[in-house]
Amino acid sequence: MSSPASSGQTPTGAHLKRSLSLGDLIFYGIILIQPTAPMPLFGVVGQEARGHIVTTVLIAMCAMLFTAISYGRMARAYPSAGSAYTYVGKELHSGLGFVTGWSMAMDYMLNPIICTIWCSKAAMNLVPEIPYPVWAVFFALLFTLLNLRGIRATARTNEILVLTMCVVMVYFFIAALRYILHQHGVSFTQPFYDPATFSWGRISTGTSIAVLTYIGFDGISTLSEEVRNPRRNILLATVLVCLITGVLATLEVYAGQLVWPNYKTYPDVDTAFVYVAGRAGGKLLFHVIDMTLLVATIGSGKGSQLGAARLLYGMGRDNTIPRGFFGVIESKHGIPRNNVLFTGAIALAGAFAMSYQLGAELLNFGAFIAFMGVNAAAFTHYFLRGDRKNWRESWSAFLPPVLGFIICLYIWLSLRPPAKIAGGIWLVIGILYAAYKTNGFRQAIVFSDPPPE
């Protein structure tokens, strides 16, 4: 077996290449979240919030913007590939950083799994002659091969996917507008507020689901070591992606509710938006939207695998997980190739081992632990330890991370018991492993500094 040095792979000799612009980051964030993100949730949120889908999406956007600001600020302080793992570890405690990274690893590795499952089942609807196992192998390999091409090729693929989905969205908006203009008695304010069904408790429950529209924006910070001027561009990209996603999601569900205002009559709750598209544009748009959701999920699976590989690289470089495997950069393309292959294998195995629902719920468990950690780190760095010149800077350092932490804690506590139990087991395993690596937490984890900008 060749050594890392002789194979052109070394934890110290090679490093990630700074080649991404602000625009590349925005495209990456949008494709990771998906321009079609609210569509799969449309029916479920509509029933939970009694038709107030637009209201829940807007509230969720405001909630996640606070956490997005914390992510961007911490990326400015620590422009490292480890993302939340590094922020919490350097700012609060190395042990808490490891627990955050361990939780994120579950989150990031689960997203390719559920994308592989969903894509395989969606493809079976198009070509039922090919069985599920074949599709699962195909999509797990597809995500992996796309991410082995290098970061610039990945960025170009993201741009094509985003532009294609934007064309389909324009097609839907035109069809929806044409349909709405031919209807009588349309209430343009009902999607925001319907006095007959409004309930704050229902709105809160719907918002806790609608917030899934924005899950994935944190993946932008995992590319900090591959970005030009990361201290500026990570913050801008993270906040802009949340805003763009929120505006686009609001327009999508608003048009959808005007086309199909009665949330009680969806033929199928899980695919309600596809039926909305069919009502607005006929059978052609029905199939176009169905195919677009498949393409969007491919993009999300590929993007989340990319983020998982970078997170594992950050943890491997610090030797919190085996450095010889996870902390290696393949010198030709400047990517953590071992991690891409590893996450691809996990996606394939998971597609046969768990259900889509359990995977999605576990994803939230890890995501919101990381969100709370980043908000706590931002509060500590900028409010408790920061040098503030006036009351505006004090409020800016205090309010976003505190509100972000409280909201994320509320959502995390609302998870169903199966997700809490399974996620808790993963967390206990991580804590035991961290105790072993740090001699009972008596040795601190040393976090690596990123290469020069």
Image: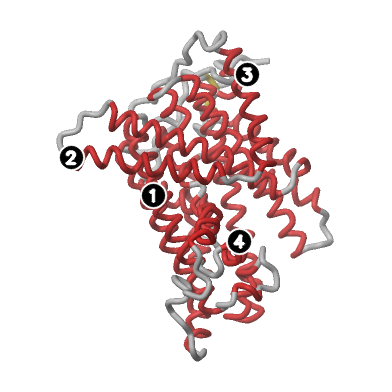
Label 2 sits on a secondary structure element that is helix
| Viewer-nearest residue: 226 or 196 | 196
Q: Which mark is residue 432?
A: 3
**Which residue is rendered at x = 57% and y = 37% of the image?**
366
Q: Indicate left or right for 249 with 45 as reference.
A: left
Q: Which x, y percent locates residue 417? A: 67, 42
Q: Is residue 255 above or below residue 95?
A: below
Q: Earlier in the sequence, mark 3 or mark 2?
A: 2
Q: Amino acid at mark 1?
A: Leu
Label 4 sits on a secondary structure element that is loop
Examine the image and state in which quarter residue 39 appears: bottom right
Disc 4, disc 3: CB below 8 Å? Answer: no
Mark 4 lies on residue: 40
Q: Which x, y percent locates residue 404? A: 40, 43
Distance CA(mark 4)–CA(mark 3): 37 Å
Mark 1 lies on residue: 65
Q: Earlier in the sequence, mark 2 or mark 4?
A: 4
Q: Is residue 295 above or below residue 447?
A: below
Q: Earlier in the sequence, mark 3 or mark 1?
A: 1
- Which mark's residue is nearer the viewer, 4 or 3? 3
Distance CA(mark 2)–CA(mark 4): 43 Å
Distance CA(mark 3)–CA(mark 1): 34 Å
Q: Earlier in the sequence, mark 4 or mark 3?
A: 4
Q: Amino acid at mark 4?
A: Pro
**Image quadrant for the C terminus?**
top left
**Which residue is rendered at x = 55% and y = 34% of the image?**
104
Mark 2 lies on residue: 391
Q: Indicate left or right for 74 with 329 as reference.
A: left
Disc 3, disc 1: CB below 8 Å? Answer: no
| Viewer-nearest residue: 147 or 210 | 210
